[in-house]
Image (spheres, rainbow, N blue to C red):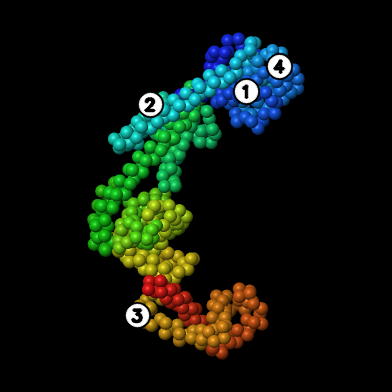
């Protein structure tokens, strides 16, 4: 199916009875997208390519140099060809023009009799418009047939087979670097040739090969190629390929959505697992029923706190789960999901070695956060807390408990650089326990009250100085540089700190206690802010 017409077809139409192809006969297969009547020489900015030019030669008349310049511009603009009416303004075609046209296989056609340019343009334009309309009509018919099939089919193979039969080309689907599927299945020898051609097409554009990726939720899930045996592919082939890829993406997304919905139905089993009710043998049996041969080398639980896109909106997290699953599976994790108390709980089953699980998980979380807001239309943002890594799957309840604590501590710590992994929270875990069983405000006040009161009374900066001094391990030069003050000012502040805290405040045990109290003060300040927000 061609949406344009070749010069070879045009010269067989009416008004082309008394013509002569004087140059560029090898280029008669050039396609014409439109017809222009031109009587000026400077036309470089007027053409867009594939135009058939009609002229009487008024712009250059019998000036060979202007004629050569005119033809060179047409070639540079990738015009389809030139038709000249001989006798009115031009009597002959210069040899230089013929030589240039033959070199570039640029057709030059002369009318030996006067012809009506208006009727020629009307005839060819009508043909082109009818062809375009037919292409659109055929494309719509193909789309309708494809949409009907989408209601009935259950496998994507049927979509690709339908495309292959419709275009009569070889269709190749690439689902990963090695998994290639052919429609129809070629002989072994031909399969290798097609595989090689597909590899070459991935690196270089070829007229008989077209390819398009299948995108799902921002990731390339597959790639579809069509390969012609004996003809160059047309724009119509590209449009059919585009419709096919869109239908394939819809089918794949529908399949994945149904699977995600099915996973949601197993929520009760998941709840029992998170509560520690299942033993190892029961878990292994359940995993085998989900995916034969699935073997996990441990797991870790992640609790996701998500924010609805609009206040009071019903949140459907199916697409969010689908997006997160797509990312984590690429990093070697098998994902189990369940909604618990308005939180999304993820069990990341590790399918690879256990020593690098955290690095892989961090990369996956970074990818998810980079696409924040796109994982589902009803979700605008989300935060994560990751529990302890467990090697026995029956201990998932331990990881789940620590994941919730990690989410709570990360929220309270409120530092951008704060890790969401429970194992990395260290002192914050100790602070949480102390705060639950003792008056942490009173303990902080015992150590830091003199400095806090001094700063309030004199609008000082001793607390900030103390933090920097401890962070720099007592280095006065580094502390002054960090605070952007001169050394003398720092000496004066340190003297004040010695009077308020004692001259021994930099000794090991007391210094450690002060560092811990400064961290505790930040912890309490953030908790106070959180309480104010909830009032």
In this view, the mark in front (3 or 1): 1
At 63% from the left and 83% from the top, the residue drawn is: 491
Crowding at dot 4, Cα within 10 Å, few <14 / some 14-19 / many 20+, comes out as some
Q: Nearer the viewer, residue 23 or 193?
A: 23
Image quadrant where residue 216 sits: top left
| Number of numbered discs on residues | 4
**Gap in Å between the C-alphas at discs 4 and 2?**
53 Å
Q: CA distance from mark 3 to mark 4?
A: 104 Å
Q: Secondary structure at mark 4?
A: loop
**Which label sits on residue 165?**
2
In the depicted view, which residue is nearer to us: 16 or 390?
16
| Observer able to see residue 428 | no
Q: Nearer the viewer, mark 3 or mark 4?
A: 4
Q: In what element is the residue under mark 1?
A: strand
Whether residue 479 appears in this view of the structure is yes
Give the Cα separation between the discs numbered 3 and 1.
92 Å
Q: Which mark is residue 89?
A: 4
For marks 1 and 4, give the CA distance: 15 Å
Estimate the x, y position of residue 146 in percent, counting from the top left: 35, 33
């Amino acid at each position: 199916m061609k949406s344009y017409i070749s010069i070879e077809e045009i010269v067989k139409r009416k008004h082309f009875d008394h013509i002569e192809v004087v140059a560029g006969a090898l280029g008669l297969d050039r396609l014409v997208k439109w017809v222009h009547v031109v009587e000026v020489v400077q036309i470089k900015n007027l053409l867009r390519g594939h135009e058939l030019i009609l002229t009487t030669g008024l712009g250059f008349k019998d000036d060979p140099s202007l004629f050569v310049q005119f033809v060179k511009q047409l070639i540079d603009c990738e015009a389809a060809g030139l038709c000249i009416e001989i006798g009115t303004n031009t009597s002959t075609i210069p040899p230089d023009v013929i030589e240039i046209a033959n070199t570039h296989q640029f057709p030059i056609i002369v009318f030996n009799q006067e012809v009506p340019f208006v009727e020629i343009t009307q005839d060819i334009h009508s043909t082109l418009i009818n062809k375009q309309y037919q292409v659109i009509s055929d494309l719509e018919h193909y789309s309708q047939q494809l949409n009907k099939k989408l209601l009935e089919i259950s496998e994507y193979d049927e979509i690709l087979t339908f495309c292959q039969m419709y275009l009569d080309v070889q269709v190749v689907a690439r689902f990963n670097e090695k998994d290639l599927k052919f429609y129809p299945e070629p002989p072994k020898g031909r399969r290798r040739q097609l595989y090689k051609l597909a590899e070459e097409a991935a690196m270089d554009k070829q007229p008989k090969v077209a390819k398009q990726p299948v995108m799902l939720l921002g990731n390339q899930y597959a790639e579809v190629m069509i390969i012609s045996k004996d003809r160059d592919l047309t724009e119509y082939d590209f449009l059919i390929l585009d419709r096919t890829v869109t239908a394939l993406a819809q089918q794949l997304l529908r399949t994945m959505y149904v699977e995600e919905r099915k996973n949601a139905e197993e929520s009760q089993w998941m709840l029992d697992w998170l509560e520690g009710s299942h033993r190892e043998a029961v878990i292994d049996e359940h995993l085998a029923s989900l995916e034969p041969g699935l073997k996990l080398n441990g797991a870790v639980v992640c609790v996701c706190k998500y924010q609805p896109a609009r206040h009071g909106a019903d949140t459907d997290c199916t697409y969010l789960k689908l997006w997160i699953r797509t990312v984590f599976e690429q990093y070697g994790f098998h994902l189990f999901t369940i909604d618990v108390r308005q939180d999304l709980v993820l069990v990341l089953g590790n399918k690879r070695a256990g020593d690098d699980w955290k690095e892989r998980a961090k990369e996956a979380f970074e990818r998810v956060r980079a696409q924040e807001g796109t994982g589902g239309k009803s979700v605008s943002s989300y935060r994560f807390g990751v529990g302890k890594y467990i090697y026995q799957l029956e201990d998932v309840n331990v990881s789940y408990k620590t994941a919730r604590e990690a989410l709570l501590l990360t929220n309270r710590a409120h530092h951008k650089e704060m890790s969401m992994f429970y194992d990395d929270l260290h002192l914050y875990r100790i602070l949480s326990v102390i705060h639950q069983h003792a008056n942490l405000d009173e303990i902080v006040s015992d150590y830091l009250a003199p400095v806090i009161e001094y700063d309030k009374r004199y609008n000082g900066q001793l607390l900030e100085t103390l933090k920097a001094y401890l962070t720099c391990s007592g280095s006065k030069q580094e502390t002054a540089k960090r605070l952007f003050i001169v050394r003398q000012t720092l000496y004066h502040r340190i003297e004040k700190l010695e009077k308020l805290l004692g001259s021994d405040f930099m000794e090991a045990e007391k210094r450690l206690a002060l560092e811990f109290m400064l961290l505790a003060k930040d912890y309490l300040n953030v908790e106070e802010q959180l309480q104010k927000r909830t009032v």
